[in-house]
Image: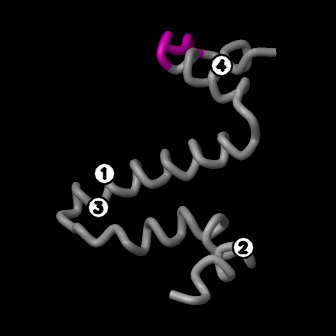
Amino acid sequence: MLYSELMSEPMSDLTQALIEEIQSAPEPMRREVFDFLVFLKGRRAAEKEGREDLLPLAQSAWAPDWNTPEEDEAWRDL
């Protein structure tokens, strides 16, 4: 069942195309798309508030990828 079939209002062509692309992507790519969307929305909210400090937003969005034993090992000697 398509997402648009669950919606009571018609969805734009762009929204439908995005959903179809996301559905066909592998799970790791979906996580990356999700993290990037959260980042973009947070950046826009910060811009509206006049703030430029995006580091906390980036840290929270990328924490699942950064906080791994593999990342710790890669950065250990730096």
Count of marks placed on residues: 4
Q: Position of residue 20 (x, y in %)?
A: 65, 19
Mark 3 or 2 closer to N-term?
3
Instruction: Give the residue type at disc 1.
Output: Arg
Q: Which residues are magenta?
A: 9-14
Q: Which mark is residue 60?
A: none
Q: Main secondary structure of the magenta part?
A: loop
Instruction: Give the residue type at disc 4.
Output: Glu
| Colour scheme | one colour
Q: Position of residue 34 (x, y in %)?
A: 58, 46
Whether label 1 touches label 3, CB < 8 Å:
yes
Foreground label between 3 and 2: 2
Instruction: Give the residue type at disc 3.
Output: Ala
- Seen from this angle, which residue lies furthest bottom? 77
Measure how far apart labels 3 and 2 are at the Cα level: 31 Å
Quadrant in which residue 49 is drawn: bottom left
Foreground label between 4 and 1: 4
Of the 4 image quadrants, the one containing the N terminus is top right
Foreground label between 4 and 3: 4
Measure how far apart labels 4 and 1 are at the Cα level: 25 Å
Whether label 4 touches label 1, CB < 8 Å:
no
What residue would you read off at disc 2? 70
Front position in the image: 69 or 23: 69
Please determine whether, in this image, residue 43 is positioned above or below residue 32: below
What residue would you read off at disc 1? 44
What residue would you read off at disc 4? 20
Q: Position of residue 9 (x, y in %)?
A: 57, 15
Residue at 72 percent across and 13 percent down: it is: 5
